[in-house]
Image (tube, rainbow, N blue to C red):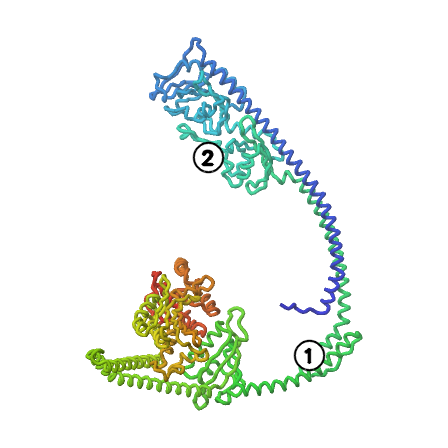
Amino acid sequence: MSKTPIGIRQWIWRAFVQTALIPLVLVEVVLIAVYLITNSTVRDAQIEHLRETALAELQAAVGLETRIIDQQLQQVASATELFRQFTARALNEDEPLLQPELSMTAEGVRYSPRDDGGAASFYSAATPPEQQDLNKVARLHRLDPLMKALHAGNSLIASLYFNSWDSYNHIYPWFATQEQYPPDMDIPSYNFYYLANAWQNPSRRVVWTDVYLDPAGHGWMMSAIAPVYRGDFLEGVSGIDVTVGGMLGRIGDLHVPWNGYAVLVSRDLNIMALPEAGEQEFGLDELTEHSYDEAIRQEQFKPDEFRLDRHEDTQALARAVVTQPSGVLRLELGGKQRLVAWSTVQQTGWHLLAVVDEAEVFSKTNALASRFQQIGFLLIAGLVLFYLLFFGFMWMRARQLSLALLKPIAGISAMMGQIGQGIWRPAAVPSEIAELDALAQHTRAIGGQLELSEAQRSQAQERLELVLESATESLWEIDTRRGTLQLRGRLPARFGLPSATLSETQFLQRIHPQDVHQVRAELERMHRGHTFRYESEYRFADALGEYHWLLSRGRVLERDPLTGQATLVAGTHVDIDAIKRGEDDLRRAIQQAQAANEAKTHLISSISHELRTPLNAILGFAQLMRMDCPPSADPEAANYLDEILLASRHLNQLLGDILDWSSLQAERPRLELQRVEATALIRECAELVRLEVQRLGLRLDVELPDAPVEVLAEPRRLRQVLLNLLSNAIKYNNPHGMVRLSVEHVADQVRLVVEDTGPGIDEALQAQMFEPFRRLGRESSNIQGAGIGLSLCLEYAKLMGGSIGVKSAPGAGSRFWIALPLDETVAQLAAHERPRVVYVEDDPLSQVLVRRALADLADVRVFDDGRTALAHVLADPPALLLLDLNLPELDGEHLLQLLRQAPATQQLPVLVLSAAVEGREHLDCQGWLAKPLDLDALRRQVRALLTVPGSSQG
């Protein structure tokens, strides 16, 4: 695409910019860039150091707070261990016991009915009253002072309890257990019991539970529990409860820098304690309220939504916490950027998270970075201001220089305009600049040269028009956008047209009605882009209404770039009326010749009939007479009768050959070719002539292969050819000679060979032996014959797709053969020479099926739409087209019509493979197979069409 021209002022300005200003700017920019890069490197190093210092400080703060939490939990764990030891000692004491006052419900539950300052007792009805161990209850009541002291000594402790294997619960502080617990409560089924058993806790140490809803009514809590064994028997579990609310209070008291907050997460990534500051960012409400409707029946844990790995925002944090004991991660929570530091609590394996606002952590660092950036911007602004002033000065200088050049250049431009208007020698414009003054003089000289060239061009144009007028009737040009036809030459005057410019409709009205459809079709194909050339013959009416033949040829000059349709077409009209009259005369002459040939054939047929009638009587009565005259009775009469019989049979054979030749000349028959086993046919012919061979004292050798040889032929005509060749080999042989029959394979053909040991034929005469009625000098011999046998053999060989050959020399005998194609065209089916077949089908399964069925017969190429297939077949016609009718883009019937209109594909064999059952009689195709396909029938049809192109199978 050409560039848009610019004025001289802009051009000078650009030259200044490119040669002086841009290099200067680049130098300054490089210097500023070096400064900024150096400054940025130092700044980034300082900022990175400050960031690392801030992150280290945050990590250290989390580690310190983690140790505080660990110490507090260690205190609870130590209290649990102490409580477990005293519990085990109390259960093993044998001192006299004071039974506490207990009540029993109707369901069989024993419980402490009132608060006497000690612990509450609850013996579940899961253990029948008669099996409840009251001594154990009495021993455990001795622990009440210890439980009270531990509870008072640590504000984190919400309650202390002992749960036995038989569902006894001893818990401090006291509450109405019979109202809170279900009567049949199975205590060992809760996590605050089974997490301490031998399978979950084989080391018998103090373990911590996950957060659960306390059935005792203290809300959401976690417990430190320790097993109490009597020998190897798990007597029960001692535990201390820590509520989530209490843990939240401790976490809220932690010192998290930058106004952050802490979050406690379990080993399983459950959020155990989430302060109010983090509820909005994590999208959770900490469980501070509770309902015991379900907790007293079964375990109630925090829902899955409290797991870090169940939220998309915190999945990366969850993975980091699992894989690293401590660290810092940048995270987006609640739409804000946060820094999360974590550390692991050694006592429980829990994780303490500190969440702080990233902006607040890096506020001082970012302020320092902003200051460095402002300094850089000030430097750039100063540079821009300087260059704006400098560019303004340079622009003024460019303006002054351009004004000095514009006047002479404008004058030269005006001279060019005058030359363009035909004023070939305009006045030159003077200029103080030598180069511009020389340019003005040179422009004036160019005008003179153009004046001379224009005169020469006009003469050449006149000569060209004279030549075109003598060679054509007219030149024409069609503008499809305006729908007009422009004519130049003799045609408008000769045919009495109203004007040299006509509409397409006006022109078509003059064309003979029988030719209009063809002309319209050719024009439409060219307009739509199906062809680049146009050619059509039609009859055109003059002013008197008489029609004359015109040949119109043209080609596309311009096309629409978007649609591809022709917009401008040009060509010539040639008067071919005389040629057409000559063609009509020739056609009439051919018809007369055909009529004469038919009359000749009819005459020969009539003569043959008239001759065969008496010949039949002669031959018949001669046979009767020969039967009544044995050689022993009258040898001379018997010899006469044998001569009559021999002459009669020869005459009968001669008449048959003449009729065959006449029928071939009148109308070439179409033989129905089929698979013929050649060796069997040769043996049959040998048996037919064996008696004649023996009678003449000759030897007959038959040398055939053991394996059968199949060829494509018509059996009766092939037998006739072989018998003719054998008859000649017998007749034109030497006494005691030899006749040999054999088979040869040559390329993709089979030769059936007949050899003799006769006198042979001179090479100069061999070209004439296949002409009818030519006996090559044997006309005067006593050997009977009419000289048309070999001619008939040649014609039948051609009709069967074969050929006749001979090799002979005087004194060396003769060797004749008929060459026929192998069945399945063996050579043609070789991998490098296999015929090309195009299959147009949009169904993938049908494509695979046909390809595999024909894999050994041809190279099959598949197209799945009609328009693509049409372009390919027209460009490179295949040996055979397999066509489905229901196709996208262009249906099969329309595709076939377009192929038959093109000269290159008019005779292309087409086999239709379609599920449709109607309309086949209207299609110009060689075969039709209905779906679902019979693959054997498909292979037979394809083999026949590939072997005998153009044969009709449909």
Q: Position of residue 624 (x, y in %)?
A: 20, 79
Please give the label number shown on residue 800. none
Please state which of the two labelled residues, at mark 2 or mark 1, is closer to the viewer. Answer: 1
Q: Nearer the viewer, residue 402 or 736?
A: 736
Q: Nearer the viewer, residue 755 or 561?
A: 755
SS label for mark 1: helix
Please give the label number shown on residue 417. 1
Figure quadrant of residue 349: top right
Q: Position of residue 882 (x, y in %)?
A: 40, 65
Q: Residue furthest bottom?
A: 544
For label 1, count other residues whose C-alpha is less than 10 Å away and answer few (under 14), some (14-19) or many (20+).
few
Left or right placement of residue 781 versus residue 492 in this view: left
Q: Position of residue 527 (x, y in %)?
A: 49, 74
Q: CA distance from mark 2 to mark 1?
A: 91 Å
Is the residue under label 1 in contact with that under label 2 (CB below 8 Å)? no
SS label for mark 2: loop
- Amino acid type indicated by mark 2: Pro
For label 2, count other residues whose C-alpha is less than 10 Å away and answer few (under 14), some (14-19) or many (20+).
few
Please tell me how many numbered marks the rendered image carries: 2
- Amino acid type indicated by mark 1: Gly
**Label 2: which residue?**
303
Q: Nearer the viewer, residue 748 or 373?
A: 748
Figure quadrant of residue 748: bottom left
Can residue 102 be seen in this snapshot? yes
